[in-house]
Image: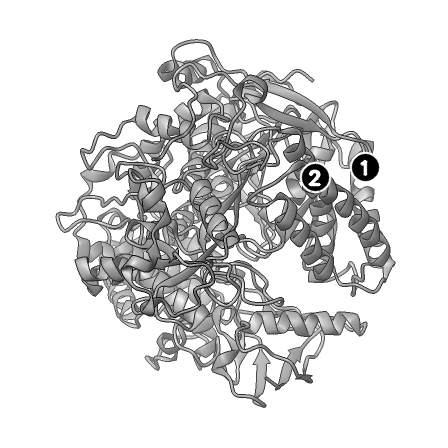
Amino acid sequence: MHLDSRVPAGPIEKLWDQARFEMKLVNPANKLKHSIIVVGSGLAGASAAATLGELGYNVKCFCFQDSPRRAHSIAAQGGINAAKNYQNDGDSIFRLFYDTVKGGDFRSREANVYRLAQISVNIIDQCVAQGVPFAREYGGTLSNRSFGGAQVSRTFYARGQTGQQLLLGAYQALERQVDAGRVTMYPRTEMLDLIVIDGRARGIVTRNLVTGKVESHIADAVALGTGGYGNTYYLSTNAKGSNCTAIWRAHKRGAAFANPCFTQIHPTCIPVSGEYQSKLTLMSESLRNDGRIWVPKKIGDKRAPGQISEEERDYYLERKYPSFGNLVPRDVASRNSKAVCDEGRGVGETGLGVYLDFADAIRRLGVDVIRDRYGNLFEMYQRITDENPYQVPMRIFPAIHYTMGGLWVDYYLMSTIPGLFVIGEANFSDHGANRLGASALMQGLSDGYFVLPYTIGDYIARYKFEKVESSHPDVTRAESEVADMTKQLLSIKGKRTVDSFHRELGKIMWDECGMARNAEGLQLAIGKIRELRGQYWKDVNVPGSAEDLNQSLEKAGRVADFFELAELICVDALHRNESCGGHFREEYQTPDGEAQRNDDEFSYAAAWSYEGPDTPSHLDKEPLTFEYVHPSQRSYK
Amino acid sequence: MRLILHIWRQKSPAQRGQMVRYEMNNVNPDMSVLEMLDVLNEELITKGQEPVAFEHDCREGICGSCGFMINGVAHGPLPATTVCQLTMRHFKDGQELYLEPWRARAFPVIKDLVVDRSAFDRIISSGGFITSPTGSAQDGNTILIPKEAADRSMDAAACIGCGACVAACPNASAALFTAAKMSHLGLLPQGQPERQRRALRMASQHNREGFGSCTNIGECEAVCPKEIKIEVISRMNGDYLGARWKSRQKGA
């Protein structure tokens, strides 16, 4: 397959203007005749659905939660980046672009990243106008904080609930369009297949999660804003319901999946405490602004942190990376935590944890300032661990958090299936091999408010859409395949629960395809995943019926997809014989243990096509060229 | 820990429900209430029974999906905590716990502990927004907002829409939820142009959904996991009365 990124030619700062000018427009009266499906109601989905409704299209928006306001964007804590340079500290669009390309370890598409940096400033304006209560200075201006991977203060925030506030802004805009009759909302409705007719995405098959009814919805274009696939690992910071089903089933209908092995491990999560554990809780990265990370110098030092003197502590990030210190990017911070724990210097009962200490910051700034900045995070920590972080250092450990990989899209955010657009975390485009903090919210809103509404219009303007009847054979076939899968899952009636399989899959992934990977382990993992998948279809026990609310059945379908995606993640990780960003292959490291990229052979996005259940996926490569930010070994020293 | 659970089981909206007794013998005090239910459900599935349906998603106390009554208190005994973050160490060994769904006419039960809260979306849809079409915004710093106003707005905006306020209110009023949104938007300069219209429309939608009236009992504030203050209801009443007065003048 030829991957045409459709990036216009010209100087990078003019590309988006030029692309917008070249786009065909849809006459306002004609917009009423076109319908668009948006799946997902997070930052990307809700902002896209609201904006498209406002433009006059007939929009249907779907989410599996009971309300669009509950999409997992809501849990983002720290903030959103924008190149406003309000702090006068030398920020610019070019610097945000530069930081993001470098932070992504030179595995993202320059043109997309530049556009993201350009649009970042509009996002803040849009959100302020909607009433997002960003933090303010006493003079009334917007406040900023700094964040990992950057040396300027460009992060806008609303306490530790930035994602919540941005999502509520988008949700309210969406509800305004619901009231105006421009958007029809379908909550508690899960997309289970993509309808492709004559090579174009023309609709989706859904299951109503309350009544079990399987239905098709036809439209002129489909946009997926269904988030990432971190839950492949079972334990992650994602919401329990976050899943890969929409993008995976679109993949099986022909959409290429790019860079699945680029998964992000977040350095600051609350450590695992027991087998029953259902998810991992993130502590915002913003804590690293004032918290200092350390472990004891001595191996196996089990004393309480207060009894370990200053000289006996190793502030390893400050020691190894003096210029960025505790603010190194996530991949670097995570890998170093793993390294000190592997040495036996980890803290807490399990030895899988490091300290994040606020004692110095409290001495310097006072308890009130720290409470004002991080109060809700400290409370959350105490609620979960029963320890008071104002008095004893927090214990943190890395956890799967975000997935940079996703469905391949061109500059117009269209996948390899014409008419199927992919936005937000669900696509692969902007973060390369590692995402910088406070950039996910930026990308979701950029795609949803400012990119997709233009590019989807261009697509609609260029084609003549034939009417599709619900009796069309491709529609009825997709519907019956969905019904068959449901029936099959319910009929196995084996001995093991869905969760027990999912937990086992997650453990394989975390052990062999987590923070550090190697060829041998990955091969082993692929074998184990296949075997476990075989058992799953023979021995899973899904209780209940297909005709009502059945949470086990919902999970069972999602876990079936996680199995298939997990294998592709490992295949991709195995093929990429280099270390970059979140993908760290132990065979490829510098003498001092940093990631060793191989630009000559791997400067490309790996786009995999589905070839069948037991056939190896086909690899196509989109070469990545860097004209503005020259690849170098990332140094944060 | 050992626990005795009494859980509301109801197969569908139309069928009658009842409390069912379960014994749990090996509860780890570090588990959340939801993780304890996960363990129970694994046991039920293995025994060939239907697991308990309950709503949950982020399990970080921010999405607002989860929530039920524990011994008659919405989200259980710990203040400012949703059930997903309520750990079992706050209960006693051998304790009996009664888990019931939110009870309110406007929140019909769908199954077991799951209720239909779509009324909240319709209240927001009726006016809980600021009209600012995409692309029309001016530079963010041209709207100066005193820190105190932004902070107070944020206090109200922290609402997660879980519905505990309704479940705790003897009148099943959603005044706290509705008023929190009015305060969030009404405390900001951007929210002024639509302030009266918002008050009128949201209040009438609230009543249309079948929520009761507020009689200043204060149970809502007591159970709110985000500690939204009841003062937002006073602000709402002020906005509403003002808007009614102005619209009467216009009508006259």
Q: Considering depth in this image, is A189 or A315 the residue closer to the camera?
A: A315
Dividing the picture into quadrants, the one containing residue A462 is top right
Q: Position of residue A17 (x, y in %)?
A: 39, 17
The numbered disc on residue A386 is: none
Give the vertical position of A203 relative to A454 (above or below): below
Q: Amino acid at mark 2?
A: Glu
* 10 Å crowding of disc 2: few (<14), some (14-19), many (20+): few
Q: Residue at x 59, y 16 (%)?
A: A4
Task: Single out the mark in the foreground, 2 or 1.
Answer: 2
* 10 Å crowding of disc 1: few (<14), some (14-19), many (20+): few
Dividing the picture into quadrants, the one containing residue A409 is top right
| Residue bearing mark 2 | A520
The numbered disc on residue A613 is: 1
Q: Considering depth in this image, is A8 or A614 the residue closer to the camera?
A: A614
In what quadrant of the picture does the N terminus of chain A appear? top right
Circles 2 and 1: CB distance less than 8 Å? no
Q: Residue at x 56, y 63 (%)?
A: B56
In what quadrant of the picture does the C terminus of chain A appear? top left
Q: Position of residue B53 (x, y in %)?
A: 66, 68
